[in-house]
Image (cartoon, grey):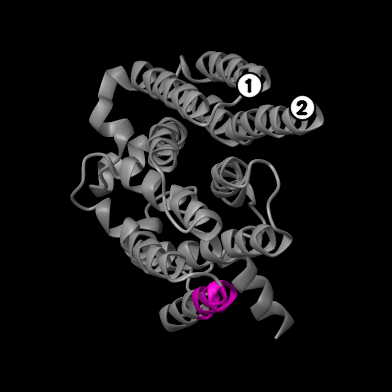
Amino acid sequence: MSDRLKLYARLVRLDKPIGILLLLWPTLWAIWIASDGRPAPYVLIVFVVGTVLMRSSGCAVNDWADRDFDRHVARTAERPLTSGRIAGWEALTVAAVLALLALLLILPLNGLTLALSVVAAFVAASYPFTKRFFALPQAYLGIAFGFGIPMAFAAIDGRVPAVGWVLLAANVAWAVAYDTEYAMVDRDDDLRIGIRTAAITFGSLDVLAVMLCYAGTLALLALAGAMASLGVAWFVGLAAGASIAGYHYGLIRTRSRAGCFKAFLHNNWFGAAIFAGLFVDRLVAHGSA
């Protein structure tokens, strides 16, 4: 049983928390803006734990959907499902149990949050299949990874204001940036097996596209800050994010696998910088009130 649990932990990427962090930061942006920096403890716990559960569930579904492709990609060939160490039904069972636990967490919240959770679950479960036909599956991933944003506003405000949708759009742009960096690592393998990714769609313009997406992310976040009447610290956080994006350009401009993968992982700090600016901004606002 111990060995089985270790395989399940690898299936849901608990050994690789970057996906959790890329989901968590935009959710925290939304929670802090919606609550004016004073989230209710239960709401905060629900969204943090729910993020871990739904990202883990999504990984299990992704591996099941991609099981016939992953064996042809060097980076994914040894995943537990792809290598045959667990069965397909086990992966789907793990995904269902984790999704059910996430649903139980939000049952005490309002009806709009519950309705949005159904949409979020559908988007997360269907994302792996978009790589078969959609030229920019990373944009769809951005919706899946960002759906905690409208859910957070719904849970706190009972509605999703315009700023919530602007934040979601910013997250889509950010996801295209970081997941294109990730796709650049596997471009040769993906071309061989027929998977569609933004790195393939953008072709020789991939580096430019990534940087334009970072610029779009920061512009939309600046707009969200203006809509929410955020202060100087928020924009200092955006400036820090811009410098991090510049660092990523240095990593990806030669398109080396190691550099692109390092840039992808480093996006945790981009999300953290934005949240740090927001956190300080709300502390200053309440301290001067």
Q: Is residue 213 above or below residue 116?
A: above
Can you say which quadrant of the picture contains the N terminus? bottom right
- In depth, the one of 237 and 54 nearer the eye is 237
Disc 1 residue crowd, few under 14, some 14–19, many 20+, Cα 10 Å: some
- In depth, the one of 73 and 222 nearer the eye is 222
Q: Is residue 205 magenta?
A: no
Q: Going 24% across and 31% down the picture, which residue do you hit? A: 201
The range drawn in magenta is 97-108
Residue that extends furthest to the left in the rendered view of this protein: 133
Q: Position of residue 76 (x, y in %)?
A: 48, 54
Q: Secondary structure at mark 2?
A: helix
Chief secondary structure of the magenta span? helix
Does the CB distance between marks 1 and 2 fall below 8 Å? Answer: yes
118 vs 265, left or right, is: left
Q: Position of residue 50 (x, y in %)?
A: 59, 64
**Which of the two discs, 1 and 2, labels the residue nearer the N terminus?**
1
Q: How many marks?
A: 2
Circle on res. 284: 2
Q: Position of residue 210 (x, y in %)?
A: 40, 23
- In depth, the one of 220 and 75 nearer the eye is 220
Residue that label 1 marks: 231
Q: Secondary structure at mark 1?
A: loop
Q: Is residue 56 above or below residue 223?
A: below
Mark 1: amino acid: Gly
